[in-house]
Image (spheres, rainbow, N blue to C red):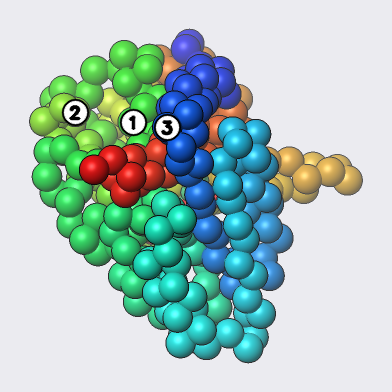
Amino acid sequence: MLILDGTSLAAKFKGKIEDEVNALIKKGTTPSLHILLANADDASAIYVRNKLNTCEKLSIRAKLHKFNPESITQEDILQKISLLNVDENVHGILCQLPLPKHINADMVAAAIAPKKDVDCFNPFNIGQLFNEETLLEPCTPKAIIALLHHYQIDLTGKRVVIIGRSKIVGKPLALMLLRKQNNATVTVCHSRSKNLKEICLSADVLIPALGKANFLNEDYIKPEAVVVDVGISKIRVGDKNKTCGDVDFNRVKDLVFAISKVPGGVGPMTIHMLIDNLVKTTKMQTQK
Ligand code: NAD
């Protein structure tokens, strides 16, 4: 059984990103990322801290704009985004999700200038995913595909089953896997799908992104399948919290051809994909 090791791939990828950032700095531009945070969610605080730490390690300028989740208005956040959109010292903007219920997340995504949209959530950039090639791609789907490509998993004609239809994982991933560079036959399942087990059993490549700890066991996996586990959940084991994926790793490990672990699979790659997008948006704005 092959482990799709996102931690070691991320370490390799980091070197490439470092070189690109240093080349930009040498030419006189330090990439600059602005993060908007309007929730008091613990997980979001950790994600934001990781992003800021990664930027610091790579000598990227990063600034956090914190809003009070209760008092923030749609107008406040849109106003901040319009200021950042026109500031030529800002190369990338992202708004950490989730947003408070009274804020329209779609409007926020649409307000971020496509050329600064490092998460690739703006409808213009999402629409570009219909094309065979695009400059920006959403970070998690990009990380999943990078992991599969690195381990030379040929997707041509393979049946890929994605579980989850979110805007940040399932839907964009499906479009990207349909591209001619991947040539996969894609099925997307969701909470209302019928016969999930049968569909999963037909998958050459299974990509669960449900967020339900250990939801999938050997009953869902075709022998010799490739599994990329995107889910991240916390469970209580004894008096400790344990991070685990959507797949019960120990129950399927002897059945699969390859599998990613949680933690250590897609997660470590995702943040580097964000920085890769920032390098791209910086180049787009500075290279005449
Ligand atoms: P989401 O809650 O927006 O979407 C979950 C999806 O799972 C939905 O489309 C839902 O229909 C589907 N689903 C739920 N229960 C189901 C069931 N019983 N059968 C079939 N489908 C079902 O979540 P998301 O933002 O897409 O994230 C999904 C998971 O991936 C979470 O655990 C999240 O933490 C993780 N995630 C990981 C990374 C990473 O970098 N590794 C990045 C983003 C999200």
Quadrant in the rendering for residue 113: bottom left
Asked whether residue 229 is in view, the answer is no
- For this rendering, which residue is in front, 225 or 288? 288
Q: Is residue 66 above or below residue 129?
A: below
Residue, x 50% and y 49% (percent of image)?
32
Secondary structure at badge 1 equals helix
- What residue is drawn where x is 68% and y is 50%? 49
Ranked by sequence position, the earlier of labels 2 and 3 is 3
Image mark for residue 182: 2
Which quadrant of the rendered structure holds the C terminus? top left
Task: Name which residue lies at 37% across and 67% down.
Answer: 86
Disc ID at residue 27:
3
Residues at marks 1 and 3, CA–CA distance in whole angstroms: 31 Å
Q: Which amino acid, mark 2?
A: Asn
Between marks 1 and 3 in the image, the one whose residue lies nearer the viewer: 3
Q: Is residue 28 above or below residue 51?
A: above
Residue under pointer 1: 145
* Circles 2 and 1: CB atoms closer than 8 Å: yes
Estimate how packed mark 3 is, as few (under 14), some (14 to 19) or many (20 or more) residues with alpha carbons within 10 Å: few
Outermost residue toward the right?
A: 239
Label disc, if present, on residue 204 of the rendered structure: none
| Label 2 secondary element | loop
| x and y, in percent, of residue 129 in the image | 19, 48
Q: In the rendered image, which quarter is residue 174 located in?
A: top left
Mark closest to the chain's N terminus, 2 or 1: 1
Q: CA distance from mark 2 to mark 1?
A: 9 Å
Tag 1: amino acid = Ile
